[in-house]
């Protein structure tokens, strides 16, 4: 049976609950504690079909919340109205931790948690809609790593959310399958949106700006499940030039400031019909595991492929970008090849290839090629696998196309 649970406004002489007129600070503090106890109890006692409603207001929460029951909806009155503030959190690794399926969270905000904003682990049929995860102090290495963090999910819809200030990724989807990430906004994170070790993901309609790196499609070596087949399309990926404030030793700490889209060690990635502009290192970077600085430091899974292959870039609108790359090596390369006032081309590729997948000229076989069908956009092949002995700028070897990927279909539809 459906239960709709709302924290009602009840006024007492010494306790003022959210929605009533405010009394002195001591009374409000008591009300905050009353609300927190109420919310924790609803999450503990929830049953399938329950709808837990968070009323408008700023609700201080000092301990992490958790939900372990499937079939529950957590709903606020708007991401700028119903706010769970963890600014004074003293316990818990996340703001909200969910280990459940058939879960929906929508129309609320999680602010300033000590760790991740919301983590959803090992679930099916998850909807995250109009949720804001934000560290209100802006970019800071002491902020939590992930804003919105679904991992090991089957069938995920993440839409119309906002993520600001994460020291790793604002929106992160990891080790999941059948994923749609659409119409979100990510700003002032190290990675705006990251898709990692995930199979079948559509990322579209998002606005990604002022991050260190805009959209990342990664395949990491120390995870049991490899990923492939991601479409990144119809996004605005603009001016992601914030200095990298990621924790030293994390994969995103190696992302250069000024990266629009970064593909690392991922296969079957399509990038099309995006507006990509003014990302100071490069609008698109394609790299292998060997260019990350983690060689020898991470354990490689037996089925791990460290090379990016079967990449297809077409129909994007590029402007600006590449004029002020991050890092001494990239700066020196840019100046040596294009002069002080010059810019990198729109696409940088580290040039590493699997020697078993190349032709007699050393180019990737057709099935594995990096194909670019994007007007006058060119690729800089840094040839790092050969010590940069033969750096090439051009489009000739990338003049090809792949069969396009099918759209992700969420089943059941969410």
Image (cartoon, rainbow, N blue to C red):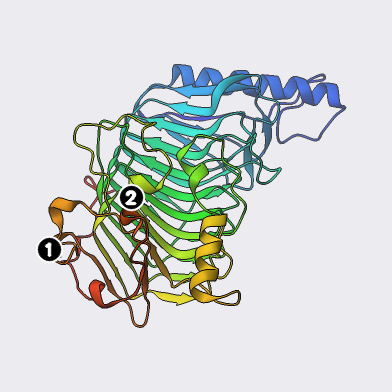
Q: Quadrant of residue 155?
A: top left
Q: Residue furthest bottom?
A: 376
Left or right? Give the position of 312 relative to 8: left
Instruction: Please report the residue visible at 82 percent of the width from the left and 33 percent of the height from the top.
Output: 22
Place of residue 412 in the rendered image (x, y in percent of width and height, measured from the top left): 22, 45
Check the picture and name the quadrant holding the N terminus. top left
Crowdedness near tag 2: few (<14), some (14–19) or many (≥20) residues, C-alpha within 10 Å: many
Q: Residue furthest right?
A: 24
Picture disc at residue 134: none
* Rendered view: 238 above or below 158: below
Whether residue 72 appears in this view of the structure is no
Q: How many marks?
A: 2
Q: Nearer the viewer, mark 2 or mark 1?
A: 1
- Per the model, the C-alpha gap separating discs 2 and 1 is 19 Å
Picture disc at residue 359: 1
Q: Which residue is mark 2?
A: 288
Residues marked 2 and 1 touching at CB (< 8 Å) = no
Place of residue 205 in the rendered image (x, y in percent of width and height, measured from the top left): 42, 63
**Viewer-closest of 37 and 188:** 188
Left or right? Give the position of 356 relative to 411: left
The kind of secondary structure element at disc 1 is loop
**Viewer-closest of 399 and 195:** 399
**Viewer-closest of 208 and 37:** 208
Place of residue 166 in the rendered image (x, y in percent of width and height, measured from the top left): 57, 42
Left or right? Give the position of 133 relative to 23: left
Decide which of tag 2 and tag 1 comes sooner along the chain.
Answer: 2
Whether residue 116 appears in this view of the structure is yes
Crowdedness near tag 1: few (<14), some (14–19) or many (≥20) residues, C-alpha within 10 Å: few
Instruction: Please report the residue visible at 77 percent of the width from the left and 23 percent of the height from the top.
Output: 29
Place of residue 49 in the rendered image (x, y in percent of width and height, measured from the top left): 36, 30
Q: Quadrant of residue 113?
A: top right
């Amino acid at each position: 049976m459906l239960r709709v649970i709302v924290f009602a406004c009840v006024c007492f002489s010494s306790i003022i609950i959210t929605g009533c007129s405010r009394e002195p600070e001591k009374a409000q503090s008591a009300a905050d504690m009353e609300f927190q106890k109420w919310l924790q109890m609803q999450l503990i006692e929830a049953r399938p079909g329950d709808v837990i409603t968070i009323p408008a207001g700023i609700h201080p929460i000092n301990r992490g919340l958790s939900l372990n029951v499937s079939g529950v909806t957590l709903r606020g009155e708007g991401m700028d109205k119903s706010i769970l503030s963890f600014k004074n959190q003293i316990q818990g690794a996340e703001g909200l931790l969910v280990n459940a399926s058939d879960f929906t969270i929508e129309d609320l905000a999680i602010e300033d948690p000590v760790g991740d904003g919301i983590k959803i682990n090992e679930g099916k049929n998850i909807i995250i809609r109009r949720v804001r995860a934000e560290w209100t102090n802006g970019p800071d290495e002491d902020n939590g790593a992930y804003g919105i963090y679904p991992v090991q999910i089957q069938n995920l819809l993440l839409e119309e959310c906002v993520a600001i200030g994460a020291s790793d990724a604002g929106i992160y989807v990891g080790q999941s399958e059948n994923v749609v990430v659409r119409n979100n906004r990510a700003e002032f994170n190290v990675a705006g949106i990251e898709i990692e070790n995930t199979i079948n993901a559509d990322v579209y309609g998002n606005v990604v700006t002022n991050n260190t790196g805009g959209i990342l499609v990664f395949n990491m070596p120390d995870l049991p499940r490899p990923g492939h087949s991601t479409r990144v399309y119809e996004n605005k990926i603009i001016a992601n030039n914030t200095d990298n404030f990621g924790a030293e030793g994390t994969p995103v700490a190696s992302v250069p400031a000024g990266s629009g889209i970064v593909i690392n060690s991922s296969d079957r990635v399509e990038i099309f019909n995006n507006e990509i502009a003014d990302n100071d290192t490069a609008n698109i970077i394609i790299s292998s595991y060997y260019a990350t600085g983690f060689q020898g430091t991470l354990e490689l899974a037996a089925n791990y492929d460290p090379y990016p292959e079967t990449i297809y870039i077409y129909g994007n609108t590029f402007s600006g970008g590449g004029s002020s790359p991050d890092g001494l090596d990239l700066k020196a390369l840019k100046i040596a090849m294009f002069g002080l006032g010059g810019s990198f081309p729109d696409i940088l590729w580290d040039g590493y290839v699997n020697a078993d997948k190349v032709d007699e000229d050393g180019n990737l076989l057709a099935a594995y090629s990096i194909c670019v069908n994007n007007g006058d956009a060119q690729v800089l092949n840094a040839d790092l696998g050969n010590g940069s002995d033969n750096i090439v700028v051009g489009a000739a070897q990338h003049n090809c196309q792949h069969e396009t990927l099918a759209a992700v279909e969420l089943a059941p539809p969410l």
